[in-house]
């Protein structure tokens, strides 16, 4: 697939429209989902890092609005992992893709740090500079670190997945769901089988396998409308669960000691591995699998916008951006104001567009390096050697 994209890029002359031509081959329904998932993550960061969640008090108007905004993005991590498992289960392992990914992370991690060192009065600590030079190993972006690890594990996971029958793989998916999702919600007072709320490589592997199962055995029927409506209704259960748990702890029942653990973190249901989040994530993913987007222009626009999504994450959630951006915008000042929800949604769109254009410029800048045929051939030979080693045929 990558050589097709590269060939199109080689025929492009300049400008955004020419970039859009390169994305026709991508599945625009899934790219639209990728775009919406990243918008959800931006919205989560606005509400959380912007201080809205910290300021909220149960049953106030802004409390309800804040948690309604907070909910969709909680499904986004699982959606990205489902997409990864869906496509990667049928792909050959590529060191070149991993190198490109690490290069993208390094570009923003180090680049933004240098910009702050030059143009701000912030003193850059030695540890922070080291983290910027080694962003994946230092966990500067926790998701990127986990994702690289998942990519490295993918050949082993794919071999395991394809060695199983449909029935066996279904049993594996059910077992993983019960052990690492249902268990943590039912036995919320226990740390056994803890996946840190889904922030762990164990949970990434679980959702990868879910996505792979859908790719191998789910057949879309094209009926996406009812599926999407059902997903939205299920999503509403997430903030409702928060409101219900907050009410529970105000009753005499809430005096039972271990029930306070229901509100561990944001709550037992506001984790990436919670029952509700997993069900909603899979429901939304299946709904978009059934969607078809016919307009070539819409497909190109969606594909280009979604293709910049990872860059949007790397820019706006850099540690220095996180420490300064939300205070500069003054998000916390919107709390208790009638315009809290529309302002958060507007900021989400503006941030995405601004970061998207920065990422498109980076893609243009890196295109010469990424299209270098000699470099790609070297990595292809490396892949062949690793594959021979894996298969026991390496001399």
Image: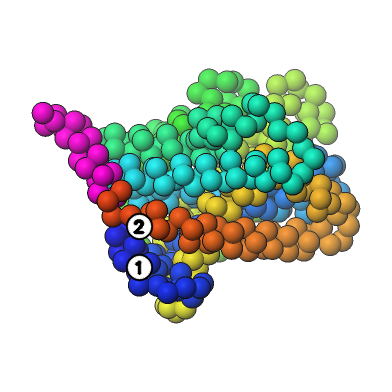
Disc 2 element: loop
Q: Residue at x 59, y 29 (%)?
A: 130
Q: Which residue is mark 1?
A: 10
Q: Are marks 1 and 2 in contact (CB under 8 Å)?
A: yes
Up the image or down, 108 lies above or below 187; here it is: below
The x, y position of residue 96, in whole percent, is 34, 45
Q: Residue at x 35, y 68 (%)?
A: 10
- Residue 310, which numbered label? none
Quadrant that contains the N terminus: bottom left
Disc 1 element: helix
Which segment did they paint magenta? 376-395
| Crowding near the residue tagged with mark 1, few <14, some 14–19, many ≥20 C-alpha atoms within 10 Å | few
Residue 382 visible? The answer is yes
Up the image or down, 341 lies above or below 115; here it is: below
Which corner quadrant of the image does residue 389 belong to?
top left
The answer to if 307 sits in the magenta stretch is no
**With 159 as the anchor, is 27 left or right in this view?**
right
Q: Which residue is mark 2?
A: 371
**With 324 as the anchor, is 282 left or right in this view?**
left
């Amino acid at each position: 697939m990558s050589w097709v994209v590269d060939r199109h890029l080689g025929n492009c002359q300049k400008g955004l429209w020419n970039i859009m031509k390169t994305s026709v081959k991508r599945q625009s329904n899934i790219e639209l989902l990728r775009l919406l998932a990243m918008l959800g993550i931006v919205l989560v960061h606005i509400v959380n890092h912007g201080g809205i969640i910290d300021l909220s008090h149960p049953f106030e108007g802004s409390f309800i609005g804040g948690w309604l905004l907070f909910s969709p993005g909680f499904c986004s991590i699982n959606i990205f992992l489902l997409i990864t498992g869906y496509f990667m289960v049928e792909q050959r392992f590529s060191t070149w893709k991993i190198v490109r990914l690490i290069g993208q992370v390094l570009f923003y991690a180090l680049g933004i740090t240098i910009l702050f060192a030059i143009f701000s009065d912030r003193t850059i600590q030695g540890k922070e500079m080291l983290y910027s030079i080694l962003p994946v190993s230092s966990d500067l972006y926790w998701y990127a670190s986990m994702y690289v690890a998942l990519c490295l594990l993918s050949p082993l996971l794919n071999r395991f997945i394809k060695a199983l029958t449909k029935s066996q793989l279904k049993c594996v998916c059910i077992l993983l769901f019960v052990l690492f999702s249902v268990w943590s919600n039912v036995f919320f007072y226990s740390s056994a089988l803890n996946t840190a709320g889904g922030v762990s490589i164990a949970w990434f592997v679980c959702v990868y396998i879910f996505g792979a199962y859908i790719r191998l055995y789910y057949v879309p029927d094209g009926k996406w409308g009812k599926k999407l409506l059902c997903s939205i209704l299920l999503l509403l259960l997430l903030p409702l669960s928060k409101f219900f748990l907050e009410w529970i702890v105000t009753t005499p029942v809430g005096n039972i000691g271990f029930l306070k653990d229901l509100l561990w973190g944001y709550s037992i249901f506001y984790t990436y591995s919670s029952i509700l989040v997993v069900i909603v994530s899979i429901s939304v993913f299946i709904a978009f699998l059934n969607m078809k987007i016919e307009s070539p222009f819409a497909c190109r626009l969606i594909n280009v916008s979604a293709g910049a999504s990872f860059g949007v994450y790397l820019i706006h959630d850099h540690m220095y951006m996180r420490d300064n951006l939300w205070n500069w915008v003054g998000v916390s000042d919107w709390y208790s104001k009638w315009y809290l929800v529309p302002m958060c949604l507007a900021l989400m769109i503006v941030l995405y567009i601004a970061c998207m254009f920065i990422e498109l410029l980076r893609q243009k800048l890196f295109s010469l390096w990424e299209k270098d045929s000699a470099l790609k051939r070297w990595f292809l030979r490396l892949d062949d050697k690793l594959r021979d080693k894996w298969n026991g045929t390496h001399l």
